[in-house]
Image (cartoon, grey):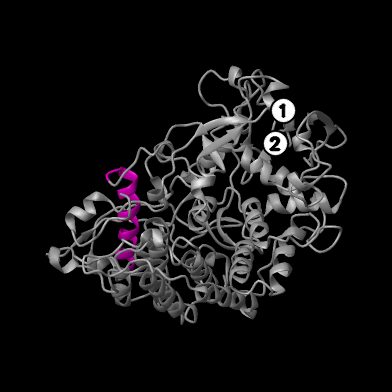
């Protein structure tokens, strides 16, 4: 009897500057036999779309159920908190274990994607009309699926550590249990497998998107970027000679995490990142900048500071721009609603949920306009108020009194954080946000719990019309991240390499702050900390912080509390930072547990340390 497959609509990827692309945008609503699924390009397209649908979807960032394969990354880090209760609350209180639903959801969903990719690769050559027109669609689709399979292994290892490598052939649905009872491979074996699979497709895929319908597809640059991300995870302290995992062994004694620190892992990463940055096929990638402020959304005057504000804001709003290496299309209103303040009495895109509440730790991490940390800038003060105007469109020449905490900060701060006294992002609105107790987005003005817990909301990723206006993509990898990966690798392997300062200063220059080594800004004596701070502010709210505090093994310090403002008071008491939430973080939390159900089914899979 032939197997029956039902392919349901996932969130499809190919949203470009002009909206939905024709490729992968139809899903059959009937049942097809296995052979029929691979006979025609129209259904082969949907089989490939099914594999892509396993990619994380940031639109579900606050989901309690694990929808879209997104985890609790932002609000389970020290970047922010969520007002809405969801799985992040379990993470932050330590109330989760190997039987928790989301622990099982992510494990199974990525393995479903891996199995779907293997099945696709084994059968796509059956297509009878894929290569009509002289284009080798079969080979391209095959290598996209191969890359996706490797990428899903990458997502697994950064959550669970070393995992089970299933092999390259699809597993038959009627395979006996003993045929699939495989132990975990070592971390080094997992990394080498992922890298080799990605290396294998790089020469066989287009280097970059060749046409508008290619956006959202895996290409060579995307495969190389994921290779870099994999090598970064492997090189950092969590998996590079971490003696905390000395006892993590298979039943035969096989060590799953190498106990010897290796600088060669950093060198390997640096080599891969440099190859990406020097690849002439990727020459069109560049940090997103603007030469002038847009006339349709004016910020005056046309200064470097204001241009940097526009650039660091619009890199996420201006479609598939020069900086974006990989992204995912979809309806973003679900996520954007979380970011917008719940302005009392407002409507439409001006009234959101105030769900995502940035921490005071993150607010304090942003530099001053002088390019200095706030603790090192003698001009910075956290007390008192000043008349100041943030670089907001259509709101020039109207400075208003705000806390000195927010005066003369760097452009990325104004692009990313909504604070009390700030004009709301919607250029057609006259709302000035206040999170004070009696403010228009404050606790007393909201009849339910939809208010910011910290006295801030996130501005990053929000369109200038508020939460209800659409965006074309979610950015998953951009060039600035590759820069930061490269300089981190150099710092750990060859700290005298001049490229460290060159690429770090490129990020700072685009951010509109003085570069190190000029303008009175000394080259940091602790370059490791400088790189980590730059990463924190540059990649804030990009689902990165949760993983790198764990991979650096600093989460026991960073992830034990969230600080914010005193939302139970008006000014001046409102501006006194307080502990909003104490959190539980134990050594075992550096990795997720292997789902208990998987270990019960396959006892040769050993559990992670501490679980």
Magenta-colored stretch includes residue 116: yes
**Residue 227 at x, y percent in the picture:** 49, 71
Q: Which residues are magenta?
A: 99-117
Give the residue at x 60% y 35%: 340
**Residue 463 at x, y percent in the picture:** 65, 43
Asked which quadrant contains residue 387, the reply is top right
**Residue 45 at x, y percent in the picture:** 39, 65
- Residue identified by numbered label 1: 431
| 133 horizontally vs 287: left or right | left
Instruction: State the separation of the CA atoms marked 2 and 1.
Output: 8 Å
Looking at the image, which is closer to me, 309 or 154?
Answer: 154
Looking at the image, which is closer to me, 280 or 17?
Answer: 280
- Residue identified by numbered label 2: 426
Task: From the image, give the main secondary structure of the stretch colored magenta.
Answer: helix
Q: Residues within 10 Å of mark 1 (few under 14, many from 20)?
A: some
Looking at the image, which is closer to me, 207 or 78?
Answer: 78
Asked which quadrant contains residue 311, the reply is bottom right
């Amino acid at each position: 009897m032939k197997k029956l497959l039902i392919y349901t609509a996932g969130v499809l990827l190919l949203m470009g500057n002009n909206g939905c692309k024709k490729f992968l945008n139809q899903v059959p609503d009937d049942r097809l036999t296995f052979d029929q699924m691979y006979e025609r390009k129209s259904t082969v397209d949907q089989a490939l779309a099914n594999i892509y649908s396993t990619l994380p979807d940031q639109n579900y960032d606050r989901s309690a159920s694990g929808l879209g394969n997104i985890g609790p990354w932002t609000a389970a880090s020290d970047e922010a908190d969520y007002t809405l209760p969801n799985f992040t609350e379990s993470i932050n209180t330590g109330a989760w274990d190997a039987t928790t639903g989301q622990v099982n959801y992510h494990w199974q969903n990525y393995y479903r994607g891996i199995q779907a990719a293997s099945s696709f690769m084994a059968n796509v050559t059956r297509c009878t009309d894929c290569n009509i027109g002289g284009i080798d669609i079969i080979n391209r689709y095959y290598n996209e699926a191969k890359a996706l399979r490797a990428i899903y292994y990458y997502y697994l290892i950064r959550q669970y550590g070393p995992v089970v490598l299933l092999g390259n052939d699809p597993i038959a649905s009627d395979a006996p249990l003993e045929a699939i009872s495989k132990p975990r491979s070592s971390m080094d074996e997992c990394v080498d497998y992922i890298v080799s699979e990605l290396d294998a497709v790089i020469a066989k895929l287009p280097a970059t998107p060749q046409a508008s319908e290619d956006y959202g597809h895996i290409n060579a640059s995307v495969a190389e970027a994921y290779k870099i991300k994999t090598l970064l995870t492997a090189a950092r302290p969590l998996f590079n000679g971490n003696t905390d995992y000395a006892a993590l062994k298979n039943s035969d004694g096989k060590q799953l995490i190498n106990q010897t620190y290796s600088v060669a892992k950093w060198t390997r990463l640096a080599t891969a990142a440099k190859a990406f940055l020097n690849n002439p096929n990727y020459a069109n990638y560049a940090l997103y900048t603007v030469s002038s402020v847009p006339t349709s959304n004016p910020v005056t005057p046309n200064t470097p500071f204001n241009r940097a504000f526009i650039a660091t804001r619009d890199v996420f709003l201006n479609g598939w721009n020069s900086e974006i290496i990989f992204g995912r299309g979809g309806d973003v209103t679900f996520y954007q609603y979380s970011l917008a303040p719940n302005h009392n009495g407002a409507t439409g895109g001006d009234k959101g949920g105030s769900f995502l509440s940035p921490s005071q730790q993150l607010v304090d991490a942003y530099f001053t306009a002088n390019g200095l940390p706030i603790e090192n800038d003698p001009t910075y003060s956290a007390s008192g108020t000043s008349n100041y105007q943030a670089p907001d469109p259509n709101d020039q020449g109207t400075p208003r009194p705000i806390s000195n905490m927010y005066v003369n900060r760097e452009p990325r701060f104004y692009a990313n954080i909504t604070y009390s006294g700030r004009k709301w992002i919607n250029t057609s609105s006259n709302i000035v946000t206040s999170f004070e107790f009696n403010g228009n987005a404050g606790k007393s003005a909201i009849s339910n719990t939809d208010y910011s817990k910290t006295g801030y909301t996130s501005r990053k990723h929000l369109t200038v019309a508020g939460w209800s206006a659409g965006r074309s993509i979610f950015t998953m990898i951009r060039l600035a991240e590759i820069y930061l990966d490269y300089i981190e690798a150099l710092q750990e392997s060859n700290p005298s390499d001049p490229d460290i300062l060159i690429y770090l200063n490129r990020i700072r220059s685009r951010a509109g702050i003085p570069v190190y080594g000029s303008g009175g800004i000394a080259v940091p004596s602790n370059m490791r900390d400088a790189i980590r701070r730059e990463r924190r502010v540059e990649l804030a709210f990009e689902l990165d912080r949760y993983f790198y505090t764990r991979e650096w093994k600093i989460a026991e310090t960073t992830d034990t509390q969230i600080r914010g403002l005193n939302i139970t008071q008006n000014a001046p008491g409102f501006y006194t930072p307080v502990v909003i939430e104490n959190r539980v973080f134990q050594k075992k939390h550096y990795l997720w547990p292997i789902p208990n159900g998987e270990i019960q089914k396959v006892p040769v899979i050993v559990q992670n340390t501490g679980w």
